[in-house]
């Protein structure tokens, strides 16, 4: 279906187009309203106003939410191009200042945000006190193109062409436990002696159990009475002697309340990347923070 209109007669409202775009991507008015931080009736009126303005129905209402009409499908790609253009304009305007001041959002995992990032931020604040930092704590990848953050600390190399990245180090994750817990186990001398130990799983897929069994342990789900995706919570559980957990050894080795567990266990190697949008080249403020993170995490 092709839509022909005289665009000179249209008074265009980007807010309405954005409402349509986000509703189409989220699949419902309620989800789109949450994403845009709007009241659902307000968002609904914006979508209805765009439909009236264009003279076409963009959505069909179904029992499970909304479904794009053929006209909606035709217009969705155009709305996406406009959305990306708007984000590019925002990024360009955000980065034009040469002053080393203003807001910078850094995305990092809970463990890195809680244990490794604070001393880096302390040094940064002493040298650049006019920079205000927001910490976006997430164990998922923040979308830098959509400005969920300005800079991210990641453990995977980005594949998006509009991002730049610096690999700052190859980190190692090791198994740690509280001394009292290892005492209760009798401090086994090798991996085989940990067959009755308790571990803290990191996800519902049993990733840690699979990793440990591939490295010589013989564990079953009964060895994992706890599961937690939040590494800072996991770490507190380890410190209190609930079981054995895995974490970056820079964090574990710096904590006197725990020690390395499972003698002979080979560490798990993983990279640390500092990632930002290419528009960072336009902003001294972002470059300063990026460089501080490269130095801090690479040291």
Image (cartoon, helix red, strand yellow):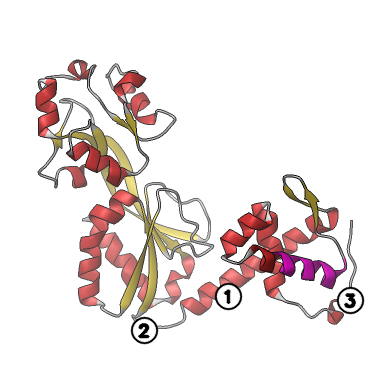
Q: Provide the residue designation for mark 3.
A: 6
CA separation in Å, label 1 and label 3: 26 Å
CA separation in Å, label 3 and label 2: 44 Å
230 shown above or below 265: below
Residue at 31%, 26% in the rendered image = 225
Q: Classify the position of the C terminus by image quarter.
A: bottom left
Any mark on residue 89, and which? 1
Label pair 1/2, CB-CB below 8 angstroms:
no
In the picture, measured across the screen, residue 226 lies left or right of residue 118, that is right
Label pair 3/2, CB-CB below 8 angstroms:
no
Label pair 1/3, CB-CB below 8 angstroms:
no
Q: Position of residue 155 (x, y in %)?
A: 37, 47
In the picture, measured across the screen, residue 11 lies left or right of residue 244, that is right
For disc 2, the neighbor class at 10 Å (few under 14, some 14 to 19, many from 20) is few
In magenta, the rendered stretch is 44-55
Work out whether residue 172 can be spotted.
Answer: no
Q: Position of residue 58 (x, y in %)?
A: 80, 59
Any mark on residue 132, and which? none
Find out whether residue 123 is within the magenta segment: no
Tag 2's secondary structure? loop
Q: Nearer the viewer, residue 44 or 146?
A: 44
């Amino acid at each position: 279906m092709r839509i022909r209109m005289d665009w000179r007669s249209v008074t265009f409202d980007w807010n309405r187009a954005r409402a349509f775009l986000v509703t189409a991507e989220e699949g419902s008015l309620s989800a789109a309203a949450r994403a845009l931080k709007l009241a659902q009736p307000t968002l609904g009126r914006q979508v209805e106003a765009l439909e009236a303005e264009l003279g076409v129905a963009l959505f069909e209402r179904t029992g499970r939410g909304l479904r794009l009409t053929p006209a909606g499908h035709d217009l969705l790609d155009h709305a996406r191009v406009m959305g990306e253009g708007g984000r590019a304009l925002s990024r360009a305007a955000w980065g034009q200042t040469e002053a080393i001041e203003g807001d910078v959002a850094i995305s990092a995992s809970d463990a890195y945000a809680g244990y490794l990032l604070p001393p880096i931020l302390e040094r940064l604040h002493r040298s650049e006190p006019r920079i205000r930092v927001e910490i976006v704590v997430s164990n998922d990848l923040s979308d830098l193109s959509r400005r969920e953050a300005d800079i991210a600390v990641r453990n995977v190399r980005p594949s998006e062409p509009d991002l730049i990245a610096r690999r700052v180090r190859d980190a190692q994750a090791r198994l740690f436990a509280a001394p009292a817990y290892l005492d209760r186990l009798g401090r086994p001398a090798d991996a085989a002696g940990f067959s009755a130990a308790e571990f803290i799983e990191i996800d519902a897929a049993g990733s840690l159990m699979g990793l440990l069994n591939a490295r010589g342990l013989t564990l079953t789900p009964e060895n994992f009475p706890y599961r937690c995706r939040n590494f800072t919570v996991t770490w507190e559980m380890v410190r209190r002697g609930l079981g054995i957990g895995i974490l970056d050894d820079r964090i574990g080795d710096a904590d006197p309340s725990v020690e390395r567990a499972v003698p002979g266990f080979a560490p798990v190697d993983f990279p640390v990347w500092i990632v930002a949008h290419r528009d960072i080249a336009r902003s001294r403020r972002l470059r300063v923070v990026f460089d501080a993170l490269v130095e801090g995490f690479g040291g």
